[in-house]
Image: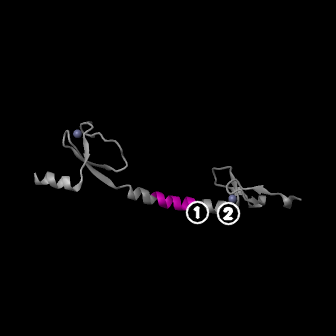
Amino acid sequence: MFDDLIVVCRKCNKKVHPSELRRENQNSDVMVCSSCFNKAKDVSNSLEEIQKEISSSKEEKVKYYCEACGFKFTRNKSIANKSCPYCNKDAVKQANIKLVKEVKDM
Ligand SMILES: [Zn+2]
Ligand SMILES: [Zn+2]
């Protein structure tokens, strides 16, 4: 009788025997089937690796200069703030290689 008991995995909706169910993780009450449990473990491992990769590639910085005060600085590409950290004016331009050369020639 008990062997006929079937539960549905919250993740994949697969019908499994209750003995196959386990907690998704230590902090979760969500019960998932063993295959989802193993998948979740793999995902959290690879997520950590991906996040490491992101944080190392995050160092892609862009050179900027301020037209108002001439202040030059580098900032993460992802930061959308366009105001100068020195004079706070909204006159910041992205300094591409050409411009830097021009400035040097002057
Ligand atoms: Zn599942
Ligand atoms: Zn400035």
Q: How is the image coloured?
A: one colour
In the image, the residue with mark 2 has its CB under 8 Å from the nearest atom of ligand 1: yes
Q: Give x and y (percent) for residue 28.
A: 65, 50
Q: What residue type is labelled 1?
A: Asp
Q: Residue 16, percent across and down?
A: 76, 60
Q: Is residue 64 above or below residue 68?
A: below
State yes or no: residue 46 in magenta: yes
Instruction: Please give the name of the residue rendered at 52% of the width and 58% of the height, measured from the top-left corner.
Output: 47
User: The disc labelled 2 sits on which kind of residue?
Assistant: Ser
Q: Where is residue 73 in the image (x, y as percent from the top left)?
A: 25, 47
Query: Can you identify the residue that label 1 sits on?
Result: 42
Q: Which mark is residue 8?
A: none
State which region is magenta.
Answer: 41-51
* Horizontal side, residue 89 vs residue 13: left or right: left
Work out whether mark 2 precedes mark 1 in sequence or the reverse, and give the earlier one: 2
Q: Which residue lies furthest to the left in this view?
A: 106
Badge 1 local density, few (<14 within 10 Å), some, or many (20+)?
few
Badge 1 element: helix
Image quadrant holding the N terminus, namely bottom right
